[in-house]
Image: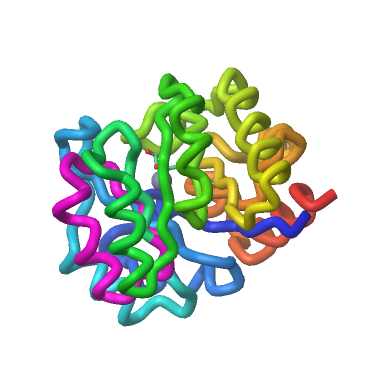
Amino acid sequence: MPARINPSILAADFVNMQRDLERIASADLVHVDVMDNHFVPNLTFGPQMVERIQAVSPIPLDVHLMIDDPDRWALGYAELGAYSVTFHAEAAADPVRLARRLQAIGARAGLALKPGTPVDDVLELLPEFDQVLVMTVEPGFGGQSFMPETMPKLARLRSAVDAAGLDVWLQVDGGITEETIVTAAENGADTFVAGSAVFRAENTERQISLLRDTAAE
Ligand code: DX5
Ligand code: ZN
């Protein structure tokens, strides 16, 4: 299975963002965590910052919205050119309508699930989405430990996607390291978000290929 590595710039140096974007130029996509201090107890940045990141980033943007009311705010990120826009199932009033509107603008639509959110109701929505994000930590902060109890959910999504012959990417986000990436890959993930594991490394390019090779083994 191909392994996409999306470094999360939550672990970057916010005042040296352009330099840090260049450090991850060999990655597949740059994962951009938008937090509003309501949906999660942390605050990052909004559309103005993401627009600048989009303008200077060597690789396309994978925007992860940890915000309330994505039905209202998500479209702006697609309009500024994000490659994918992922919003939370727990926050969206009408996920299917929002996915279609994002796709109409030209973005891939993603649905994210917090660790405690069951997968049952999501399975029937799979054909509407381009990717599903299984959170492997409680959203809000980088540097937390991977939660293996989220793996059965991922495995169920992988079976459902394959059984229906869909091309839906399955993404994991939180606590992904050279060790945990193996577990996530075994349970069906094909797209891996890694913040601290990439930016903590002295040689970020080498770390990205190490993660990619380890996941693809
Ligand atoms: C957490 C964010 C993640 C975070 C991952 O709420 O969604 O993208 O940056 O960071 P690490 O890889 O350090 O767990
Ligand atoms: Zn994220």
The structure residue drawn at horizontal position 32% and vertical position 63%, both measured from the top left corner, is 102
Judged left or right of residue 77, residue 73 is left
Residue 45 appears at what percent x and percent y?
20, 55
Judged left or right of residue 181, residue 186 is right
The structure residue drawn at horizontal position 46% and vertical position 79%, both measured from the top left corner, is 58
Asked if residue 168 is positioned above or below residue 95 in the image, the reply reads below
Q: Identify which residue, 56 or 131, lies in the foreground.
A: 131
| Residue 82 in which image quadrant | bottom left
Residue 89 appears at what percent x and percent y?
34, 37
The structure residue drawn at horizontal position 71% and vertical position 61%, both measured from the top left corner, is 209
Residue stretch rendered in magenta on the structure: 61-84
The structure residue drawn at horizontal position 78% and vertical position 49%, both measured from the top left corner, is 214
Q: Is residue 52 visible?
A: yes
Judged left or right of residue 101, residue 25 is right
- Residue 66: in magenta span: yes
User: Which residue is farthest right?
Assistant: 217
Q: Is residue 178 visible?
A: no
Residue 10 appears at what percent x and percent y?
37, 50
Judged left or right of residue 58, residue 211 is right
Q: Identify which residue, 20 or 116, lies in the foreground.
A: 116
Residue 53 appears at what percent x and percent y?
31, 72
| Residue 149 in which image quadrant | top right
- Residue 9: in magenta span: no
